[in-house]
Image (cartoon, grey):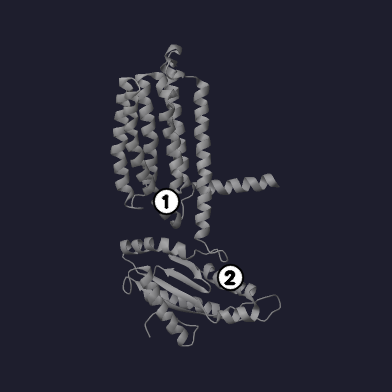
Amino acid sequence: MRSTTAGRRFSEMLEQLVSRPDEVMLEVGAGGELLVARLRVAVAAMLLLLPLANAMTGGQFSETLIGLAGAVFVNVFSQLWLALARHGRRFRWLPFASGAFDVTATTLVLLLLAWNHLPSGLNSMIVWCGYLLAIALTALRNDGRVTLFVGALALVEYALLTAGVFAIATPDQLVSSDYGTVTLGNQLQRMVLLVASTLITAVVVYRMQRLVEMSGTDGLTSLPNRTWLLHRFPRLLDAARRDGVSLCVALIDLDHFKRINDEIGHHAGDRALLHVVDLVRDSMEEGEWFARLGGEEFVLVLRKPLGTSWERVDGLRRALFSRRFVPDQGADPILVTFSAGVASFPHEASDLSGLLRRADLRLNSAKAAGRNRVLARDA
């Protein structure tokens, strides 16, 4: 039984890691990508000190030049990644490309070191740790796909580098007074460390995804909440602008819900909320998003013109009116209704706060006019 449960949890974790994150997670990841870019710039600047330290401690001149060339290369590209990361989620491929750069830059420096002195290419711990840093930084992007991609790329590139060195080197060329003896066992241990680092980072990403997911999901109804709406709505507006279509927001509030709680209790009141949510969720259409703002207040976002959106929300109102809520088995059915106000983008407001403000005014007018109605025009 336990093994079955553990297997199911592992399967769920793997499925979430390889799936595209939701909008809240992608927004968080975009901020993480910018943070990674800034860290990369700081680390790249510090890398310029390594060739100087190597020269001052009597290191080989050729190794100093290789280190300097690698540091300059990383610094130039770090500025490029930083400039791209400042554009948020405009470049969806950016986390994969910058992560691949971190791995490949490490491989190129190791390749140059091996070309100069074979043992230094495989036994240089300082440069090799670049792989571990590249994998660890993917945790800030909150995307399991990026972590697995970067970890797999690091493993493949290092395995190919190791195979290439062992293919061309003689046993004497793998012995160095400065770097020790290069052995296949040591290289396999490093590959195991790369796999372990990838798995640990992936678990961290999964845990972060779960925490962010919980912060963007309403606990009672499992609907997206206000946090999700705040992160997702700007993207919906961008898509509406790009496609030249209307976007409407319906602010929905259950009528006399406090009275329902007082009469049948809070637990039954929760079930009444779920009764409404199930009705709306079961009839959701493409281009619609339903979220709970809190209490008995909900938002329905519709990718439709104002008139069509009014018809849609009023249809839901009539469906709820005709479907009574039964608190308990054998109990008398209870009538649950809602009032709503609808506002449209781009004609009435250009952002979420403006749309909610206009919809709230119409919602209040609907309640003042007797409740159980939907208004899409100012009274």
- The amino acid marked with disc number 2 is Leu
The residue singled out by tag 1 in the image is 29
Instruction: Give residue 163's quadrant in the image.
Output: top left
Residue that extends furthest to the top in the rendered view of this protein: 172
Q: Residue at x 42, y 22 (%)?
A: 164
- The amino acid marked with disc number 1 is Gly
Q: How many marks?
A: 2
As drawn, the label of residue 369 is: none
In x, y percent, where is residue 126? Answer: 42, 29
What separation in Å lies between label 2 and label 1 (alpha carbons)? 32 Å
Q: Is residue 332 left or right of residue 55?
A: right
Q: Nearer the viewer, residue 112 or 315?
A: 112
In x, y percent, where is residue 71? Answer: 32, 32
Q: Nearer the viewer, residue 80 or 342?
A: 80
Which of the two discs, 2 and 1, labels the residue nearer the N terminus? 1
The residue singled out by tag 2 in the image is 274
Question: Height in image: 347 above or below 126?
Answer: below
Tag in front: 2 or 1: 1
Q: Is residue 333 visible?
A: no
Q: Is residue 353 visible?
A: yes
In x, y percent, where is residue 265? Answer: 64, 77
